[in-house]
Amino acid sequence: MNNSVLATTLILTMLFLILSSLGLGLYFLVKDQGQSKRTVRALTVRITLSIILFLALIIAFAVGWLRPHGL
């Protein structure tokens, strides 16, 4: 498996995890009605995953695993 496929798989996995964490945050917000810290934890995880994804994209572009292309 080449590096661009690995990078694409990483990106899609991270996006799925980010959306899952966002959905959990919404679920906890509705279920707990703001009485617990589970919503804050889920959204903190989402922000952390987003930062990790952003850094991974920067590294992948710098190393050459991903290349911009014209449409």
Image (cartoon, helix red, strand yellow):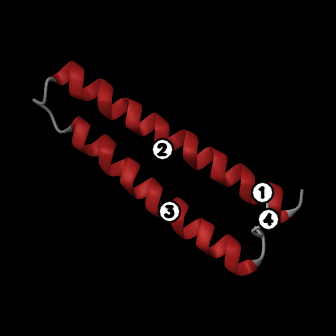
* Place of residue 51 in the rendered image (x, y in percent of width and height, measured from the top left): 45, 62
Q: Please identify the residue farthest to the front as the structure is shown.
A: 71
Instruction: For the residues labelled 4 and 1, say whether their Cβ atoms are less than 8 Å apart.
Output: no
Label 2 secondary element: helix
Q: How far apart are marks 1 and 3 (CA)?
A: 16 Å
Q: What crowding class fits label 4: few (fewer than 14 Cα within 10 Å), some (14-19), or many (20 or more)?
A: few
Instruction: For the residues labelled 1 and 2, say whether their Cβ atoms are less than 8 Å apart.
Output: no
Among numbered discs 4 and 1, the one appearing first in the sequence: 1
Query: What's under tag 3, amino acid-wise?
Result: Ile
Q: How far apart are marks 1 and 2 (CA)?
A: 18 Å
Query: What's under tag 1, amino acid-wise?
Result: Leu
The residue under label 2 is 18
Q: What crowding class fits label 1: few (fewer than 14 Cα within 10 Å), some (14-19), or many (20 or more)?
A: few
Q: Please identify the residue farthest to the right as the structure is shown.
A: 1
Q: What crowding class fits label 3: few (fewer than 14 Cα within 10 Å), some (14-19), or many (20 or more)?
A: few
Query: Residue at horizontal 39%, vertical 37%?
Result: 22
Q: Answer above or below: position of 62 versus 30.
A: below
Query: What's under tag 2, amino acid-wise?
Result: Ile
In front of the other: label 4 or label 1?
4
The residue under label 3 is 52
Q: How far apart are marks 3 and 2 (CA)?
A: 11 Å
Query: Residue at horizontal 31%, vertical 29%?
Result: 26
In front of the other: label 3 or label 4?
4
Among numbered discs 3 and 2, the one appearing first in the sequence: 2
Query: What's under tag 4, amino acid-wise?
Result: Gly
Residue 6 disc label:
1
Among numbered discs 4 and 2, the one appearing first in the sequence: 2
Q: How far apart are marks 4 and 2 (CA)?
A: 28 Å
The residue under label 4 is 70
Instruction: For the residues labelled 3 and 2, say whether their Cβ atoms are less than 8 Å apart.
Output: no
Query: Residue at horizontal 65%, vertical 46%?
Result: 12
Q: How far apart are marks 3 and 4 (CA)?
A: 26 Å
